[in-house]
Image (cartoon, helix red, strand yellow):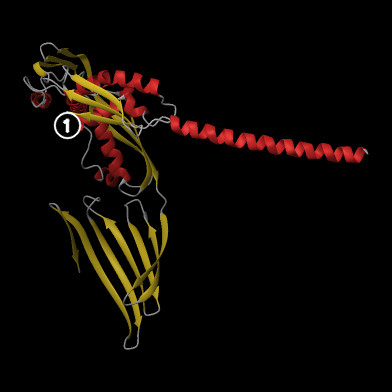
Amino acid sequence: MYAETREILGALCQILLLLMICQTVPAQQKNIAEEQESELVVNVIVEGLNDDEEKNALIYLELEKNKHNPDLNELWLKRLHSRAPENIKHSLRPFGYYQVTVESRLEQDSTGVWQASYQVKPGQRVKVKKVDVQISGGGANDSQILAAVKKFPIKENDFLDHELYETEKTNLLSVIGNLGYSDVKTEKKRLLIDPLENSAELTLYIDTGEKYYLGQFRFHQNTLQVDLVNRYLVDVEPGDPFSQKSLLAIQQSLVSSGYFSVVDIKPEYKETKDQHVPIDITLTPAKRHKLSFGIGYDTEIDLNASMRWQNRLLNSYGHNTDALLKVSDKKSSLRGTYWIPINDPRTDKIGFTAKFETEETDDTDRNTLNLEAAWVFKWRDWDSKLFT
């Protein structure tokens, strides 16, 4: 009797569970369908602007940013639409438009898609009425700075362009800094705009500070002869204007030599004397040996394998060597070259090469040994090579 009761209760539980599942699935499907129906589809159209202006307007438009947001509902859509004219007006100010009018319209078509359209009239563009750029400090009479100021591209009666103004202001400060005035700063910068008059006044006062120069180069290394290291620095030397650009030139020249893996440049500002800043240069040598492998195919010798070994530093004079071994069924070779940097070591060097080659085909069986010397140099803008 007890067992029969348990079986009956178990069957009832299964029936109830099935009924609950049947009730739940349609409800879930209904909720999903309702959610899908509630997702809004919105098209945003901006008319009356050129490509750059339209692109910027879409970036500023909050509605454009949120039109694919799954939480967007009709109330939020209308709120974003009401803010759109102000968004567009702000987007056009960088181009010099301060009298913008926007006609906006929000409609839902027969398919349920919302169309948000904005007809824009930019109005008259603001013109620059006055440009006042003044230089003070140690570079007030520097001819290169005065020439840069003269070339400042924003002139009176030009249309106002905020992006151009910011770019050229930064460029002018960069030019002054690269001439050795590392403490350059703006004393006064102001862009005064009168929307009613469609005019703007630009004020830029720059204090250059004192001019500094590269002092002694103090190398910390035991890899190369100091004379050879200096020959890699033909584009920059003590006495040149001190700037981040000149420090970067030192670093790039030494890294490109291939002898150093790390080039640490440290200006010693506390030791500055007569506006000359000593430069500590710590050089970490690169790995001397490099081994590489390759597999290739040539129509003459079929499949071939290669191995190349390089010793990038044989001695403190920068001599280096490399060897290349190529192996295939028909043709194999071993070539070794010894290089000596001379004059400008970046472009000039002398090389001695020995190459042994063996070839064995149906109609050829030969072994050859070639010896040659080469002088590699730069003449004007040409990379040249002479063989013997």
Residue furthest out toward the bottom? 363
Q: Is residue 9 visible?
A: yes
Dot 1: within a 10 Å radius of its alpha carbon, few (fewer than 14), some, or many (20 or more) residues? Answer: few
Residue furthest out toward the right? 1
Residue furthest out toward the left? 157
Q: Which x, y percent locates residue 264?
A: 36, 36
Image quarter of the C terminus: bottom left
Q: Nearer the viewer, residue 193 or 320?
A: 193
Q: Nearer the viewer, residue 38 or 296?
A: 38
Q: Nearer the viewer, residue 5 or 253?
A: 5
Residue at 35% over, 79% down: 358
* Disc 1 target residue: 50
Image quarter of the N terminus: top right
Q: In the rendered view, would you say 353 is above or below 219?
A: below
Q: Quadrant of residue 230?
A: top left
Residue at 34% over, 60% down: 321
Residue at 39% over, 23% down: 74
Q: Is residue 137 visible?
A: no
For numbered disc 1, what is the local secondary structure? Answer: loop
Q: Which x, y percent locates residue 123?
A: 13, 20
